Image: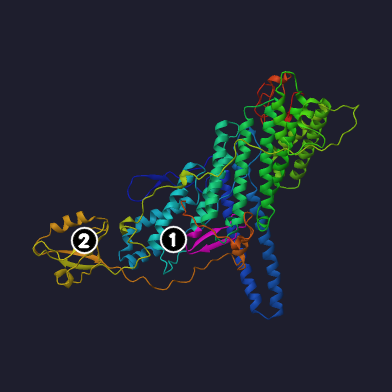
Amino acid sequence: MTDALLPNGINDGGGDKNYFKKGCNPFAQTGRSKLQNTRASLNQQIIKQMRMRAGAENLLKATSNSKVKEMVLLELSYVNSNLQLLMSELEGLNSSVEVYQNNQDSANIPLIALGLKETKEVDFSTPFKDFILEHYSEDGKTFEDEIADFMDLRQACRTPSRSEAGVELLAKYYSHLPLIESRFFSPTRQTGIFFTWYDSFTGVPLCQQNLSLEKASILFNMAALYSQLGTRANRQTLTGLEEAVSSFQKAAGVLNNLKETFTHTPSYDMSPAMLSMLIRLMLAQAQECLFEKIALPGIRNQFYSLMKVAQEAAKVSEIYDQVHQCMIQTPVKDNVPFFWSTMSQIKTNHYRSMAHYFVASALLDHQLGPGDDEDKQEKTLSQVYDSLPEGCTALDILKNKDERQRIGKAHIRRAIFGHEEALRIYGLCKNTNNLEVLQEILKASHQRSVNKHSENENEEEFTDYSEAPKIISKTEHKAEMEFPAAAKVKVIDFFQRLGPQSVFSAKQRWTAPRTIRIRSDDRDLGFTLKGDSPVQVVSLDPLCAAAADGLKEGDYIVAVGDTECKWMSVSDMMRLLKDMDEEGIDIQVVSMMDNSTAMPTKSATFCGNLPKTYSMICLAYNEDDKNSKSRKVAKKSSFLSWGLKNKMKSASTLSLPTADKAGALPWNKPCPTFPSSSSYNNDSGLY
């Protein structure tokens, strides 16, 4: 499934001849485009219903007529009902993972990708032109091309391609935002530009005048794009798994940067509690892909290999259990899709059951022989268990065949119960019922454990209900947050013609340019120059002709004759002044004004008529520090099948289960990749 890119490009400002692709065609008939178009439509319907509800509530407060109140209350019930239906549809979109998966004949357990946040178009043209005229005293019409390029760049970011080029597009726009903020967003006045972004989980619109919401939302979409790249990777190949791991780790890194940099964004999807959960989810999926990478070439049916992979599977289960615990906490549980919580529970039980299955295989299929390293096996087994059954030692289990069989059967029963629980949870969510691939993998895993139990069942023995010891989770390759280099992109200021940003910014107030005639008197101008881009007048002789004409000490020279010189050095400036004739030359200067005006009030935030406590609810929960009120946040700078068992156990391998839609995978080979769900009754199936 590919994204249709628009063919034309945008110059990256400054004439460096670097062009980048525009975003995807929003009308492209791809699954992802259709999903985003539906999301945008739902957002518009949600905001319409919220406006109707706000109007009805205001009318209810203003009227005292009982009949009018009765009609308004009836209308409110309809509006609230419609809102609930729309929210349910949006949750369904967030549960639609199929369009993000790699489209292969043989598929793995589906992974979760974040959907892109939607935004409205913003017209910068008139506000920027007015600001350039009023603040920089230049004709805003001469900057129409630069303004149009910036608007085209933002428009392209609304539909980024699902590729590294799409990430680069978002990163370039994000890198331009601090430059735009410095140029046009003054701390003493409002620009009148409103940025509207929709919550990706609730569809509630959030509108602000400052650029913090814009920056945070672009970072969120960058992380969402990385998560989509991760789910799209081909996990049947080593390269694809490495790509998936890297993408999920980068998504976690971007989300962590968002969490630490923008700590007060009044939006549920970017609240600290929600971001903490999303970071854990991305790292859990990266760890899952690392486990699949270990199992991809096949797991050798040997004691040490089975024990090692068992602990790796237990690690994946442990991390998904932590994700699920985050999802059921307030306020996350009120907004996270039920499908996500269900998937985390399924994977917690599934991978825990796999861990017990591997330990059972190691104990039941292998006996301690004369040529085996007794000390090494004892150490390995003791490191797998948190605590051994009472009265047992690791060496007793290894040497005593009956004890070994007893513990092994306890593990296989635990595996069966876990797979049954995963299948039970699968049936509780209507969105998981559409994932036939997941159901096939869960059934295949359960059947394999049942077959293993049947192979070792002895009718003459009494049933033993011993509980299997807990398996310690351990991994040699832990998923870590990764800060993507692509997020830090150098860009050229679109509006560099306004002058050096360190001086000509929205924070500084300037007088209108004044024309001064300067003449050379015995090669003496009556003043000296200092600085570098722009040049500043110092040591002005108050009796010189330039001073009499209005030149002041501290003035910046912005033009000499018809030559713009905001970016000139002192030496370049002196060469210009050296060539003047006896009549002199006109220069244009500007003076810095006092900047001690009072700060305006904070810009208003529209949150879809939600209560004022909305943003506080978002910040209320953080599992890293429940007493968040007393915690100081250090602000950082933004960057911003199971395989088959051969009859000869010594040469057999195991691999992860999957669904084989084509039914063409050679499961009887010594080193299969992923077994089919159609091999339930295959005698050689170890898992």
Is 412 placed left or right of 7 in the picture?
right
**Residue 590 point in image, percent of width and height:** 26, 66
Q: Quadrant of residue 679?
A: top right
Which of the two discs, 2 and 1, labels the residue nearer the N terminus?
Answer: 1
Separation (CA) of disc 2 from disc 1: 41 Å
Q: Split into 4 quadrants, where in the image is the N terminus?
A: top right
Give the mark count.
2
Give the amino acid type for the residue marked by disc 1 in the picture.
Asp
Q: Is residue 209 above or below residue 216?
A: below
**Residue 440 point in image, percent of width and height:** 72, 36
Let me know if residue 177 appears in the view: yes
Is 561 placed left or right of 470 in the picture?
left
Q: Which mark is residue 529?
A: 2
Q: Residue furthest bottom?
A: 64
Part of the protein shown in magenta: 194-213
In the image shown, does 447 or 464 lie closer to the viewer? 464
**Label 1 Cα crowd, 10 Å radius (few <14 / some 14-19 / many 20+):** few
Q: Nearer the viewer, mark 2 or mark 1?
A: 2
**What colour scheme governs how the chains and residues are painted in the rendered image of this protein?**
rainbow
Q: Is residue 413 above or below residue 328?
A: above
Give the amino acid type for the residue marked by disc 2 in the picture.
Leu
In the image shown, does 291 or 631 lie closer to the viewer? 631
**Residue 109 point in image, percent of width and height:** 66, 38
Tag 1 residue: 123
Let me know if residue 642 appears in the view: no
Q: Split into 4 quadrants, where in the image is the C terminus?
A: top right
